[in-house]
Amino acid sequence: MTSGQPRILQGLWLTLFSILYIWLLLHIQNTYQRTDKVINEDALGYYLILPAYFKYNDPQFAFLDTTLRKTETFKNYLPPVVNSIDNNKKVCKYYSGVAMLQTPFYLMAQSTDKENGHGFGLHYQKWILVSVVFFVLLGAFFYFQLFTAYGASHFQSFLLLCFIVFGTNLQTYLTYDPAYSHAYTFFAFACLLYLLHRFKISKRAITVFAIGLILGLITVIRPLNLYVAIIVPVVIGLPYFLSIRKYIGHVSLLIMGCTVFPLIQTFIWHWQTGQFWVYPYGQETLNLKHAQLIEFLFGFDNGWAIYTPSAFLLLFIGLIIGFHRKTIQVTLIGLIGFAGLLYILSSWYYLHYGCTSGCRPITEYYGIMAVLFVYNWNNSLLKHQLKYIILPVLIAAFAYNRVVLYQYYNHIINWCNMDKQRFSMIFMRTHEVYKYSTYPFWDFSQYEIKPYTDSIVVNQTLKIDESVNIKTEKKTESDNRVLVQIRGRARSTLKSAYLRILITKEGQYIEQQTVLLQRKMSIDGQWHEFEFKFPVHTKLAGANFWIKLEAAERGKDGTLWVKDIAFKGLE
């Protein structure tokens, strides 16, 4: 193989990864209608400083009320992205590192905005999506270089990139909610590790300054992630630090680099509040005395090992191999470092970090876990024997996480408030009936329910795959919003048995609802009262109800006796 061939092969594998990533990004954006939601929730907070400074010159964010709340996208809900401080000034809740990386792309969007939009429209969202692609692929390039440097083949490096990007919940924050901080931190961590590796080889002063720059950038993306700085002595090596007096120039350059981005952040705060130092998170803090480590790892509400075992096992196996091959220094520091990280992350005031796809705050560390795995794996004398055990385990975990990601995107898993019972109900389930099955039923407290009731007597027994049609005739003629109540009795030994209700009028679709029987009664083969309520926001006079008892799997029985359908007006 000539010297140029490795680069060609590397380019081919990176090109294939890039194609797969961009295809998946566009597929998820289109399939789940995310193209106009790139700048949403936390992503809006990270982005906010750009239009505030470059478009509105508004350090107090008055444009949020005067402009943004009047748009179709944000008229009903605007995320809480601004906090007030003691001097009654407003400050963006989020640090500005992401905005700094987005700045060139924002300026391109603004310079090509022919309609002079408000700065949050589809045109700007597309450019921010381009920024995500740019930094994710650049981060992938750095990780690929590191994997190969530590002994992985080009093919192995490609597979490992696919594993951490497509087989963990990191995928969510690179495709579904791509403009959060995680895509940019994915790049920043990869760049830091790559620079450290280069410095270990060359000891160049410019590399030291670049390491300082990237550490400062990591700090102003999300300050807690500065924890990653503990990896610096691990990669560079203890002898260098023992002779640090010889490298005082390097130390000076490192400190200079570290201050650049934090200094920019202080000026941004001063522009907003007149103060150079602000704690923008308000009441949101760490509580190190009350860490919830076990729940963070194994809880059924987005516990890391439960929802992303692929990454959890990658770290665990990497550490075990390291201890086996006696790379004690690196592996022990890795164990202590990740244990400390998990402890800190589990100490945040809100354990679940909002409604998330799996355990969100640890996603940016997956690349580091992969580097540790490669470092230990490719130097293990038993890797050829272990691969027959470890590789099937990792492949199974990858497949499991692909199912979990599908469940998240299709609302089978509730992004908030999961528990053991709900998790057991939807474990590895992908049938359409499980969509929203972990979400609460409708809350009718916002309505005034009218005192009168119309009803249709059905008195029909349904077995699995049997259906009945009911015509409403003149019922609910005067109501625009109707509470529909289906009552009866049911028994089943099949946990996937469900009721499907299709409402049509003059051949036109009005509404469809599905409800698992187990959400309303015990699945023990005994008869139980059954009642299901749902709202319909249209007149139902002359509508047709098609009710069918179905099951997502075969093997057991189910019977439903439909007593009647009742209608109440909602105001």
Image (cartoon, rainbow, N blue to C red):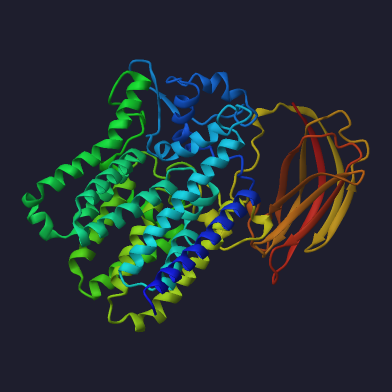
Q: Residue at x 23, y 46 (%)?
A: 209
Residue 228 shows up from this direction: yes
Q: Residue furthest bottom?
A: 385
Q: Nearer the viewer, residue 138 or 46?
A: 138
Q: Quadrant of the N terminus?
A: bottom left
Q: Nearer the viewer, residue 464 or 504?
A: 504
Q: Position of residue 517 (x, y in %)?
A: 68, 55
In the rendered structure, the answer to whether residue 414 lies left or right of residue 289 reads right
Q: Residue furthest top?
A: 87
Q: Nearer the viewer, residue 180 or 199?
A: 199
Q: Residue at x 83, y 58 (%)?
A: 461
In the rendered structure, the answer to whether residue 410 lies left or right of residue 313 reads right
In the rendered structure, the answer to whether residue 102 lies left or right of residue 371 reads right
Dividing the picture into quadrants, the one containing residue 83 is: top left
In the rendered structure, the answer to whether residue 162 lies left or right of residue 453 reads left
Residue 416 shows up from this direction: no
Q: How many marks?
A: 0
Q: Position of residue 146 (x, y in %)?
A: 33, 63
| 137 versus 287 height, above or below | below
Q: Residue at x 8, y 56 (%)?
A: 242
| 463 versus 48 height, above or below | below
Q: Position of residue 496 (x, y in %)?
A: 66, 61
Q: Position of residue 449 (x, y in %)?
A: 73, 29
Q: Residue at x 39, y 63 (%)?
A: 144
Q: Quadrant of the C terminus?
A: top right
| 110 versus 147 height, above or below | above
